[in-house]
Amino acid sequence: MVAVFQDHPRIAVLGVRCSTVEDLEVLLGYVVEPAFRAGCTLRVHADKGLEELDPAAFIDPGWRCPWTLERLRHLAAVYAEPVPVAADPPPSRWRRLLGRLSLRRDTPALLVPRLDPEQNAAVAAGDGVVQIIAPAGSGKTTVLVERVRELHRRGTPCGRILCSTFNRDACREMAARLGAQGLEGVQVRSFHGLGLWILREEGRLRNRIGTVEDAVWEEIAREAAACEPGCGAFNGAAAQDAVGRFKLADMIGPGEAWSRAAAAGPRGRAEVRAFALYEEHLCRTGMLDFDDLIARSVALLQTEGRVRAK
């Protein structure tokens, strides 16, 4: 689609429906985002204006917030005063056909000489969400550093750039490599560190952050199992696994977990009881665990547009 918009610097799209999240996803993914990346001047005629849409009616299931609508509104604001696009006339039909049949393979110019074409494509990607899948040892950190340099070159202040890493070691390495490039102001945080920062900024932290002792987990498991005869072997490790699944995989609280456990059988109900008992223990002791740093910050981003806007 990007190539289509590159060949046509001005495009009008008519008869667009904006009734469901799926409608907005198609509009964003197949029209607005590719046109924006290609620098195309775009006109969209729809049955409703984006500002007329109620965000509560357009919640993305995967994000649990109106992400697609917010992204469309952002790009619409950027497009509000279109910039004329200087473009060469599109090639003729025959020239395009010859180009497809040609056996010649031009090597694209490298933006960074030590990176391969795929890595440079990641560095030079336009605005918006870009998903890059790369295995271990493929140069991800190098590409990220170059991507930050590119964003900074385009005018993004270092303080508005955030890099997230899996753990503290990777965080330190990334910060050191960015510092060596003169990009000390970039925020570099592990996933847990980012969650901690968000919760602290929004005043959502408790007195302390830590882990619960094994003896407490065993007591929670015994109490939960005693209330659900027939749940089978249920120890502290099983309770801990269940709680982690509720918090990070399902991202739900005990209340919603109970509503799902109505037909789950003794084992499922024991897991939910353990979850509820564990959350009561955290509240009673004034503590958050490390899963909370991620789960609560994600929930905050999903429910608070003000926080997402930061």
Image (cartoon, rainbow, N blue to C red):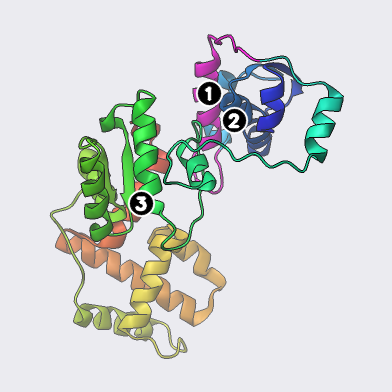
Question: Which residue bears the numbered disc 3?
Answer: 141
Residue 296 placement, left or right of 289: right
Q: Provide the secondary structure element on which disc 3 rests.
A: helix
Q: Amino acid at mark 3?
A: Thr
Q: Would you call the spot at circle 3 few (<14 residues within 10 Å), some (14-19), or many (20 or more)? A: some
Vertical position of residue 51 compared to residue 100: above or below: above
Residue 252, percent from left and from top: 43, 58
In what quadrant of the picture does the N terminus appear?
Answer: top right
Q: Amino acid at mark 2?
A: Glu
- Is residue 167 visible in the rendered image? The answer is yes
- Is residue 299 visible in the rendered image? The answer is no
The label shown at residue 29 is none
Which of labels 3 and 1 is toward the front? 3
In primary-sequence order, the first of circles 3 and 1 is 1
Query: Does 73 appear in magenta?
Result: yes
Quarter of image, res 82: top right
Q: Which residue is more in the foreground, 271 or 27?
A: 27
The label shown at residue 75 is 1
Magenta span: 59-87
Q: Residue at x 17, y 52 (%)?
A: 206
Q: Are marks 1 and 2 in contact (CB under 8 Å)?
A: yes
Q: Provide the secondary structure element on which disc 2 rests.
A: helix
